[in-house]
Image (cartoon, coloured by chain):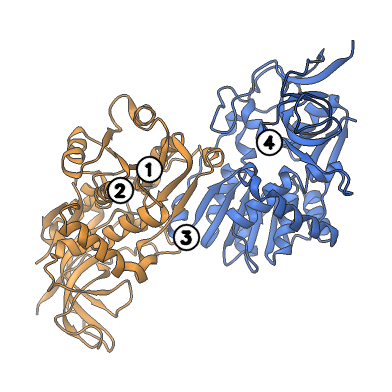
Chain colours: A blue, B orange
Amino acid sequence: MKKIQKVVLSSRPDGVLNPNNFQLVESDFPSVGEGEFLIKNRYLSLDAGFRQWMNEGASDNYLSAMPLGEAVQSIVLGEVVESRHSDYPVGAHVVGRTAWETYSIADGSDLMTIIDVENGVSAEHHLSVLGPSGMTAYFGLTDIGAAKAGDTVVVSAAAGGVGSLVGQMAKILGCRTIGISSSDKKCQWLSEELQYDQVINYKSAPGLGQSLKVLAPDGVDVYFDNVGGEMLDTVLQNLALKARIVLCGAISQYDVDSHSGVRNMWELITKRARAEGFMFSDYVDDYEEAAKVISQWVADGKLNAPVSVTDGISTTAAAFCDMLTGKNLGKSLVKLC
Amino acid sequence: MKKIQKVVLSSRPDGVLNPNNFQLVESDFPSVGEGEFLIKNRYLSLDAGFRQWMNEGASDNYLSAMPLGEAVQSIVLGEVVESRHSDYPVGAHVVGRTAWETYSIADGSDLMTIIDVENGVSAEHHLSVLGPSGMTAYFGLTDIGAAKAGDTVVVSAAAGGVGSLVGQMAKILGCRTIGISSSDKKCQWLSEELQYDQVINYKSAPGLGQSLKVLAPDGVDVYFDNVGGEMLDTVLQNLALKARIVLCGAISQYDVDSHSGVRNMWELITKRARAEGFMFSDYVDDYEEAAKVISQWVADGKLNAPVSVTDGISTTAAAFCDMLTGKNLGKSLVKLC
C-alpha cells in the first residue's frame, strides 16, 4: 500500500533549531471523511514565523505549540486528488496551512484558498509574491506601515522571503529603501537584483547604528521588522517623528536562549512612533484587490519574485534551518512534485 | 536687591535620583528683553517624564539633557508681572515649560499658554485635570488608546498624576478599569476615591501576571503605560486581540541602571496589537474642545482631580523624588505663593 511521507518535529529545539530536531517518517494514507478532501502537495512554503510554535508551551492567540511526533505545520500548495467537500473538487489547486507532508487531509479551514493555475501564474509565484509572503509584504507596508512616497523605509532580513518583496514594493511606492542583511554577498544581491537604494551588512563595521545615522540622517519613517531583539532596539534609536514599525517577525528571538529585551521603548514616546503587529490572514477580504495590484507590478517587470527552491521532502528540515540562518535568497520553497 | 530662588540639578543621578542631586540657589533678577516677559511662578508641576532628561546624554527629539547647574525644567503656573511681549500682558496667568524657580523669563515658546482664572477653575485644576496631565490622560486614552465602552482598560501608576485621571475617564467612557499600584493603601484609595473596578498591588501575591489572568481573562484591550520595563512585559502577555498600548511614560526606566528590556514584543504580532507613543503637546489644537468635555465631567461631579501639594520651593526636590517612588496620591504640585 502506498505511503505518505511526512517530516515530524521529533524533539524540541534546545536553543538553536537544527535538522536533528526533525525526522522523516512514513504513514498510511488517511481516509477522507465527510466534508474533507485530500491534497497532493506540490510545494511546501518555509516561513520563519512557524519556528516560534516549535517551542514548548509556545501556544498563543494565533497557533498552539506544535505537538512532538506530528508533521510540522506549514503553508503548502497542492492539488485536490480526492474530495468529499463540494467547495474543493478534485483537480482544484489550493494554498493553505497543513503540514510538511506529501499528502494532506483538509476541511477548508486553516486559510485554505483555491488558486487559479490557468492564468499563467506559476506555483512558485502563488507561494511567494501572490501568496502569504506577498500579502504580508503588501499589507504590512501599505496598511501597518502606511508607507508613502518620500519615506525612508528600512527592512530587516531584507533578502528573505518577505523582505525581498518589501524593498521592491517600497521602491515602487516611491520610498527610499535601506535593506539590512548579514553578508556582503547578500547585500550585493539586494542592490543589484532588488534595487535597494542602500544596504547595510549589520555584521560589518561600522555596525547597524552608525550606518543608520549616516544613511538615514533624518530618521527612519518605516521599519519593516522581521528580526526583533537587538536589531529592533538599534533601529528604535534612529526613528523619525511619527515613525511606524511594522512588527512582522522576530527571527532573532525564536531560539528561546537568545531572547533579548527591547530597551529603547522610550524612543517610541519622544518620537510619537507606533509599533504594530499583524498577520497577513487578517486581510483575507482584501487579497483579491492586492493580488491585482501585485500582478500588475509583476507584469510590468517592476517586481521580481526571487525564490530559493530545494527538491524533495527530505530536504525540508535542512532548508528550514538554513533559512533561519539566512542562507536563502528570496522565498524558501521545497518542491515535492 | 531681591533675589530669585531656583532649584538646580547639581549632579547627575547615579542610579536612583535623590534630593542630593539638587541644590536650592539664589540668583539676581533677570532683565526682561524685548519680546520677553517675567512670570511670578505660583505652582510647579512635578511630572515624572522630566526625570529622563536629568540623565547624561539624554538628548532626544523632544528635549535635551538638562545642563548641570541650571534650574530644572518643569511645567509651571504663574502670573506675568513684567512684560515686553504684547501677547502676554502684565496680569495674565500662564502655564508653560520653564523651570523650578520662583520667577521665570519666557518668550511665549515652550508650550506657553494663557489660562483663564476668572472662570472659577482653581490653579490646581489648571495644572491637573485641565493641564498637561489632564490632556495627557484624555488624548492618550481617547486617541492613542481608542478606548470605547466595554473595553478592559489597565492603568499603571494608577494613583499618579496622569493615572488617577485615566481610570476615571475610562470609567466615564464605559470601560472596565483595572488600576495597578504599589501598596494596599493606594489600591484602597483607587477603589474608593477613583472608582476603579479592580485594583492590583503588583508587589503582593499572586503578582501582576497572575492577577491579570484572573481579572482580565479575555485580555487587556487598552494598557495605559506609565511604567514601562518589566510591567509592560507582563501586560504584553495578557493582551486581547487588537489591543492598544498607550506609551505615556516609563517611570521604571529612568534610572539608567534599572533599564530592563521588553522581551515579549512577539505578543504584539500574534495579538495584532499596537504600542504607540505620544506627547500631550501634539494635541494643542484640540485642547479647547477637550477642556470643554473635561470641565463638564468635573462640573457633573464625575471626575475628581486629586492633588498632592507641598509648600515652598525648598520642598521641590524631595517631592519630586517622592513622586518617582510613588508616595503621592494624584497630581504632585509645589505651591510657591
From what the image shows, is residue A329 above or below residue B71? above
Residue B154 horizontal side relative to residue B95, left or right = right
Callout 3 amino acid:
Lys
Residue A200, visible in the rendered structure: no
> Could you tell me the amino acid type at mark 2?
Ala
Residue B157 placement: quadrant: top left
Q: Residues within 10 Å of mark 1 (few under 14, many from 20)?
A: many
The structure residue drawn at horizontal position 21% and vertical position 47%, both measured from the top left corner, is B322
**Labels 2 and 4 within one chain:** no
Point out the frontmost of discs 3 and 2: 2
Q: Which residue is mark 1?
A: B151
Q: Which callout, 4 or 3, points to the residue nearer the camera?
A: 4
Total tally of numbered discs in the picture: 4
Q: Is residue A271 visible?
A: yes
Image height check: is A118 above or below B88? above
Mark nearer the N terminus (2 vs 1): 1
Looking at the rendering, which quadrant does residue B100 occupy?
A: bottom left
Residue beneath label 4, please? A111
- Which residue in the protein does label 2 denote? B170
In the rendered image, the quadrant that contains the C terminus of chain B is: bottom left
User: Mark 3 packing: few (<14 Cα in 10 Å), some, or many (20+)?
Assistant: many
Circle 1 SS class = loop
Q: Is residue A11 left or right of residue B32?
A: right
**Quadrant in the picture for the N terminus of chain B:** bottom left
Q: Residues within 10 Å of mark 4 (few under 14, many from 20)?
A: some
Vertical side of B184 occupied by B146: above or below: below
**Circles 2 and 1 on the same subunit:** yes
Label 2 to label 4: alpha-carbon separation: 37 Å
Cα distance in 3D space between marks 4 and 3: 37 Å
- Position of A291 with respect to B108 (left or right) is right
The residue indicated by pointer 3 is: A271
Judging from the image, what secondary structure is the residue with disc 3 in?
loop
